[in-house]
Image: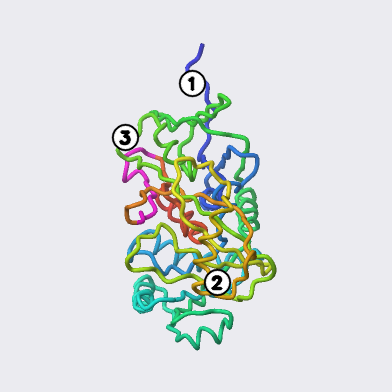
Amino acid sequence: MSSPSDAVDAVDAVVIGAGVVGLAVGRALALAGRQVMVIEREAAIGTGTSARNSEVIHAGIYYPSGSLKARLCVQGKELLYGYCAERRVAHRRCGKLIVATSPSQVATLPSIIDQARANGVMDLTLLTREEARALEPQLECLGAVHSPSTGIIDSHALMLALQGDLENAGGLVVCHSGVERLRITDKGIEVMATDGTVLRARTVVNAAGLHACALARHTLGLDPRHVPRPWYAKGNYFTLAGRSPFERLVYPAPEPDKHLAGLGVHLTIDLGGQAKFGPDVQWTDDPADLQVDPDRGDAFYAEVRRYWPGLPDGALQPGYAGMRPKINGPHEPAADFRIDGPAVHGVPGLVNLFGIESPGLTSCLAIGQHVAGLLR
């Protein structure tokens, strides 16, 4: 009987995970001339984190200067707007208001603008209450910051466009293909599928999202010191009955005395004008826990009415939940993206993507370029 190493199919590059980031990475590698196979355990592309988020194109405001999140978000935003225009992916540069409803929040507004400028985002403006209400008459606040380059996008249309580019460049997307483990050998990296198939690749990119840390832990030959602990922060959304009274996104300003795993219960709108509120932060040990508890709506009413006191009783309906693939715990500062290439862990041809939460969607094209650069 042959060993797994004797019964493998040789491929050039394998990307594990066909979410928006995995597809963008596969596209970048294919456009660089690599023969790429993107493998996905589910029946279709983009059914995980990529299908359960706010669909916001972020400006790059909050992230620490010099971080991967800051750099790749700002770069990715420009790439994404250009790509959407070129590929006719539905999107809208609607803008966002970051609103202060308490004196302590008002005090944070100038620092938000300073942080954005340090990240290369130069278009933010400070608004008085009257100026903010002139833009959004239903809004209540003490002051606000306007971010005109924030937008919304049809994430599924984006992923279909990325898949089309990948396949047009000779790449392949294969669904129903879960991966059990990886093994580092002197002939390449073996990808062992749950159905017993074994592929040997020159390059493997672990873009498995919520399961990236687990897959890295099941990579024989990778030092476990290079694998972070996964944490899961569920985000619940509630939808608004009827059309949104707001034209722009509305985000609460950060509370200086609170450590937040998200950006607060904010209002986003989709391309059809439907409003949703969320996500909140609910830490869980189960990444498959995606049921929305209707009782959490009570807290949503209280949070939303701080900036929209006109929210009617009974107007919020349980929507959907997403899961943030975090690599920091509840009482730790938000972690940066981890894009670990051979220079980090010493394994030729392997790139692990850890903690690719928001702004992963905005950053996807920039992440693709970054990973392709690491493997060039």
Horizontal side, residue 290 vs residue 203: left or right: right
Quadrant of residue 194 in the image? top right
Residue 223 is marked as 3
Q: Please provide the residue range marked out in magenta.
A: 334-348
Residue at disc 2, secondary structure: strand
Quadrant of residue 151 in the image?
Answer: bottom right
Q: Nearer the viewer, residue 133 or 103?
A: 103
Mark nearest the camera among 3 and 2 is 2
Residue 199's x, y, as percent? 52, 30
As for residue 201 lying within the magenta part, the answer is no
Q: Could you give the CA–CA distance between mark 3 and mark 2, rounded to whole angstroms?
A: 43 Å
- Mark toward the start of the polypeptide (2 vs 1): 1
Q: Amino acid at mark 3?
A: Asp
Task: Give the numbered dot on residue 249.
Answer: 2
Kindly check if marks 3 and 2 are in contact, taking CB atoms under 8 A apart as contact: no
Give the numbered dot on residue 152: none
Answer above or below: position of 17 versus 318. Answer: above
Identify the mark at residue 4; answer none if there is no mark.
1
Identify which residue is drawn at 46% across, 30% down: 181
Amino acid type, label 1: Pro
Residue at 48%, 56% in the rendered image: 360
Please tell me whether residue 283 is drawn above or below residue 251 in the rendered image. above
